[in-house]
Image: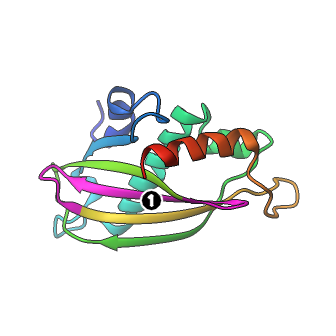
């Protein structure tokens, strides 16, 4: 295995809950040295990468399509329109982190995802809120979330509230 290969892909297959409508979806990964700044603390943009990879893994499990696939096959597109990141404690290389996904709000055309990064000692390291907006891929305007997608979003939201 190359050292630059993300741990996420391998742990997602082993650790991701296959039926997320019944249990909370989590991804476990190890903080790699390359994810950190020279002081040995996880680098801010990498946290957003962790979160986007977690949402993408959830979409693959629950919707059976990656973010890219949803966006490239007639949609709706689901671009991120807002991201807020709160850092609570430090993550360092070789630490395990569990990424826990929640759906906090489902609007007419928006989805608010929240991902918590929890260190192996059950310490909250960060909380990121991403808001995605369903858009028509032709005119790039907001469009209602399709019923098939809304049903899966709501089922998952109910299980993890």
Left or right, residue 102 beside residue 96: right
| Residue that badge 1 annotates | 114
Q: Position of residue 89 (x, y in %)?
A: 20, 69
Q: Residues within 10 Å of mark 1 (few under 14, many from 20)?
A: many
Residue bounds of the magenta highlight:
105-124
Up the image or down, 90 lies above or below 35; here it is below
Q: Quadrant of residue 93?
A: bottom left
Its colouring scheme is: rainbow
Residue at position x 76%, y 48% in the image: 76
Left or right, residue 47 beside residue 118: right
Residue at position x 44%, y 53% in the image: 102
Q: Quadrant of residue 114?
A: bottom left
Residue at position x 80%, y 42% in the image: 74
Q: Is residue 151 magenta?
A: no
Q: Quadrant of residue 151?
A: top right
Towards the viewer: 10 or 153: 153
Up the image or down, 8 lies above or below 106; here it is above
């Amino acid at each position: 295995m190359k050292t630059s290969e993300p741990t996420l892909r391998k742990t997602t297959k082993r650790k991701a809950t296959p039926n997320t409508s019944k249990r909370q979806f989590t991804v476990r990964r190890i903080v790699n040295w390359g994810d950190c700044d020279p002081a040995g603390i996880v680098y801010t943009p990498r946290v957003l990468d962790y979160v986007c990879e977690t949402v993408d893994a959830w979409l693959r499990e629950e919707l059976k399509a990656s973010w890219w696939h949803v966006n490239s096959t007639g949609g709706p597109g689901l671009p991120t329109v807002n991201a807020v990141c709160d850092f609570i404690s430090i993550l360092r290389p070789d630490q395990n982190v569990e990424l826990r996904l929640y759906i906090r709000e489902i609007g007419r055309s928006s989805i608010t995802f929240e991902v918590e990064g929890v260190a192996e000692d059950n310490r909250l390291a960060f909380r990121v809120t991403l808001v995605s907006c369903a858009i028509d891929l032709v005119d790039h305007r907001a469009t209602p979330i399709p019923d098939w997608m809304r049903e899966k979003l709501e089922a998952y939201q109910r299980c993890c509230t």
